[in-house]
């Protein structure tokens, strides 16, 4: 249904209705959108209903907060792209207010954010001024934020382009299995492949499958890592927890190597690194701000990632 809507002439949709739908999605409720737009809740409801009648589709699920349907996501993405083009045009015409900054929203995984991604953002020219809105999400789910129109670009593990987006490879983020020396002595004696199935393990969150996949490949079984696991949903906290001996885990190479060298960590199965391919997906949009960010990200990734 959403793809069918993309084939319609979105530019024929009334812009006030499109902007109203975006406001409802961003604010979460019709009343909050009305306050943000300085109109009545009744006017907001009428605009959304008119837009749904015009497209012939339900665009919003009326929950709290509201959420867009598949077709609604197409219109929301269009609304954000339209707003981006309008801001770029105003800036080029010198119509922006003094000090106004162009906002660029990006979805990025935690390990990239902790290792190389901020270096890329520091390279982005700040004339005209930019401000970044980063949404931290697992690399397997960042493309979803693009699909929903919540971000303009994403670092993702998905090689297939989201509709309306372009995709290019960035390289591979290498992970190394690690544990503290004390943890290894206490839990990982004997056969490593058997010990890892029993030893306490670190995981980022409940969707993190990296450690389980490592154990499955090592043991050549369907069984993953131990059921005794700790969840630490930040890259820095995950590293600290492994170093403190709470469990073993897979760490980005750039984080782990210095700690191997000073003896804070020991590397498990050195011949079995895990490489996660990363891609840069972005809107197909002629935006100077987005082009500047893309250039900095791809150049930094070429220096920081493998392959």
Image: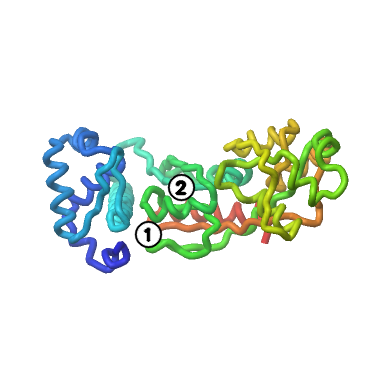
Q: Which residue is mark 1?
A: 286
Question: Can you give x and y, in whole percent of width and height, for residue 205 in the image?
Answer: 57, 41
- Image-quadrant location for residue 64: top left
Evaluate if marks 1 and 2 touch, with contact meaning CB atoms under 8 Å apart: no
As drawn, 82 above or below 178: below
Q: Look at discs 1 and 2 and give the one toward the viewer.
A: 2
Question: Can you give x and y, in whole percent of width and height, for residue 145 in the image?
Answer: 42, 50
Q: Secondary structure at mark 2?
A: strand
Q: Residue at x 76, y 46 (%)?
A: 196
Crowdedness of circle 1 by 10 Å Cα count: few (<14), some, many (20+)? few
Front-most of 60 and 286? 60
Q: Residue at x 87, y 46 (%)?
A: 190
Question: Can you give x and y, in whole percent of width and height, for residue 281 in the image?
Answer: 48, 58
- Image-quadrant location for residue 165: bottom left
Front-most of 117 and 65? 65
The answer to whether any part of residue 82 appears in the image is no
Residue 83 disc label = none
Q: Residue at x 18, y 58 (%)?
A: 13
Please report whichever mark, 1 or 2, sits nearer to the chain's N-terminal start. 2
Q: CA distance from mark 1 to mark 2?
A: 16 Å
The answer to whether any part of residue 53 appears in the image is yes
Q: Which residue is mark 2?
A: 106
Crowdedness of circle 2 by 10 Å Cα count: few (<14), some, many (20+)? many
Question: Can you give x and y, in whole percent of width and height, for residue 130 in the image?
Answer: 43, 42
- Left or right: where 252 falls relative to 290: right
Q: Quadrant of the N terminus?
A: bottom left
């Amino acid at each position: 249904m959403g793809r069918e809507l993309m084939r319609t002439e979105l530019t024929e949709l009334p812009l006030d209705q499109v902007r109203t739908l975006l406001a409802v999605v961003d604010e979460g409720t019709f009343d909050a959108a009305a306050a943000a737009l300085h109109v009545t809740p009744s006017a907001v409801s009428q605009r959304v209903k008119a837009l749904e009648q015009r497209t012939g589709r339900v665009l919003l699920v009326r929950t709290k907060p509201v959420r867009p349907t598949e077709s609604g996501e197409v219109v929301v993405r269009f609304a954000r792209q339209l707003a981006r083009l309008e801001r770029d045009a105003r800036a080029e015409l010198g119509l922006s207010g003094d000090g106004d900054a162009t906002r660029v929203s990006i979805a990025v995984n935690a390990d990239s954010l902790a290792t190389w991604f901020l270096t890329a953002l520091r390279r982005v020219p700040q004339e005209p001024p930019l401000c970044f809105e980063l949404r931290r999400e697992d690399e397997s789910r960042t493309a979803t934020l693009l699909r929903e129109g919540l971000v303009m670009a994403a670092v993702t593990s998905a090689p297939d382009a989201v509709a309306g987006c372009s995709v290019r490879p960035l390289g591979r983020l290498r992970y190394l299995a690690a544990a503290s020396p004390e943890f290894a002595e206490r839990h990982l004696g004997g056969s490593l492949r058997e010990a890892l199935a029993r030893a306490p393990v670190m995981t980022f969150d409940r969707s993190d499958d990296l450690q389980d996949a490592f154990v499955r490949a090592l043991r050549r079984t369907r069984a993953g890592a131990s059921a005794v696991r700790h969840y630490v949903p930040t890259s820095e906290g995950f590293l600290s927890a492994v170093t403190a001996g709470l469990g073993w885990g897979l760490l980005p190479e750039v984080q782990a190597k210095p700690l191997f060298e000073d003896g804070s960590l020991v590397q498990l199965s050195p011949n079995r690194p895990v490489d996660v391919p990363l891609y840069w997906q972005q809107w197909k949009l002629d935006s100077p701000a987005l082009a500047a960010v893309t250039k900095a990200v791809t150049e930094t990734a070429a220096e920081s990632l493998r392959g």
